[in-house]
Image (cartoon, rainbow, N blue to C red):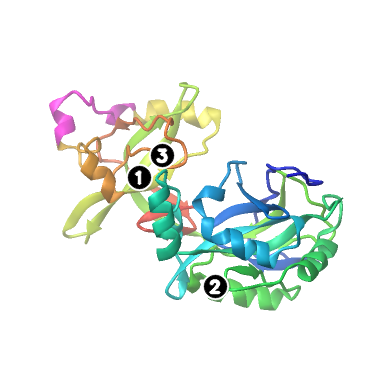
Amino acid sequence: MVLPVPFPLKPMLAKPNDGIPSGDWIFEPKWDGFRCIVFRDGDEVQLGSRNEKPLTRYFPELLDPLRAALPERCVVDGEIVVAVGDRLDFDALGQRIHPAESRVRMLAEKTPAAFVAFDVVALDDRALLEVPFAERRVLLEQAITPGAQVHLTPTTTDRDVATDWFRRVEGAGLDGLIAKDPASTYQPDKRILRKVKHQRTADCVAAGFRWHKDGKGVGSILLGIHAGTPDEPGDLRHVGVSASFTAKRRAELVDELAPYVIDPASGEFADHPWSSWYEAEAHETGQLPGAPNRWNSQRDQSWIPLRTERVVEVGYTIMTSGRFRG
């Protein structure tokens, strides 16, 4: 494969924006899927993830539709999504990342993916990295032939239309809005775009934490919410983590959480609601921490249990399959 923009490529990213921006912007729906850059050179098609990892083997059902929809030689940026019923299903999409080829083939038939194109980085022998987005969008519209599994994302320059999209798309499983500067060039791995998401908060139990990768502070706090009602709380379900702390805050949290730490070898740990985290059957539920990471099986998932006495307010944008995201 020889293209003017070689595989792999880190995509251009978005930074959070407080509300829908005014001014000269091109707005798009924010798709809730896997970011994917498609590289096509004749019959050869490669799918690259946001982190430059190959995705091709996980979505074999997309290769022929992409060959039919895209030019012979191109690099196109977009999103892989899975729809179940009348809405996008991020959990079903996540199940597609599986080491067994037989399961990949089965899921490709059971929950086929689609690709939504929203930018073009190269066409034929021309790299488009320095071309303004407004011009790249016209080139993309001219180049793509949408089909059942390959789509072109809609756009608008009308802020009122974008506001209406923002209100309505959540029910379809979308993730908000993206705002793009018409004059912006394509800058890999730079946060040039703007993203607008629905903001929510929830009160969660701080039930454990993981050390930061440098070993010098708290890297993330494991969050739980009780099933049931306030009067009759049920099991404490793992709903995600709070992370991205500054180095100063990571150090402060060590002291703040110290009074709540439980020794996993003690009898007290047996009463912790997640004491069974290491059991294989617990991992299958997705409601307890400690399961192997689907994207990185080598990542350390060990954690330190805390007494479930501390409640924290956390912000999130969307919950899928009982887990916070964003």
Camera-nearest residue between 193 and 208? 193
Query: Is 87 above or below relative to 33?
Result: below
Of mark 2 and mark 3, the one earlier in the sequence is 2
* Residue for point 75% across, 42% down: 6
Q: Mark 3, residues whose alpha carbon is within 10 Å: few (<14), some, or many (≥20)?
A: few
Give left or right: position of 31 versus 125: left
Residue occupying the point 39% across, 26% down: 255
Nearest the viewer among 52 and 207 is 52
Q: Which mark's residue is nearer the viewer, 2 or 3?
A: 3
Q: Give me the C-alpha separation between circle 2 and circle 1.
A: 28 Å
> Element under label 2?
helix
Cβ–Cβ below 8 Å for labels 2 and 3? no
Name the kind of residue labelled 3 in the image. Answer: Asn
Label 1, on which residue?
223
164 horizontally vs 81: left or right: right
Q: Is residue 53 left or right of residue 120?
A: left
Which label was assigned to residue 96?
A: none
Element at label 3:
loop
Residue 169, numbered circle = 2
In the image: residue 46, left or right of residue 210: right
Above or below 213: residue 68:
below
Residue stretch rendered in magenta on the structure: 258-270
Residue 99 screen position, x and y as percent = 42, 43
**Which badge, 3 or 1, is on the more N-terminal residue?**
1
Question: Which residue is pictured at 21% across the width and 44% down the height?
Answer: 281
In the image, what residue type sits under mark 2? Val
Task: Using the image as rendered, state which of residue 166 and residue 119 is in the foreground.
Answer: 119
Which mark, residue 293?
3
Rendered location of residue 262, percent (x, y): 24, 28
- Residue 215 inside the magenta-drawn segment: no
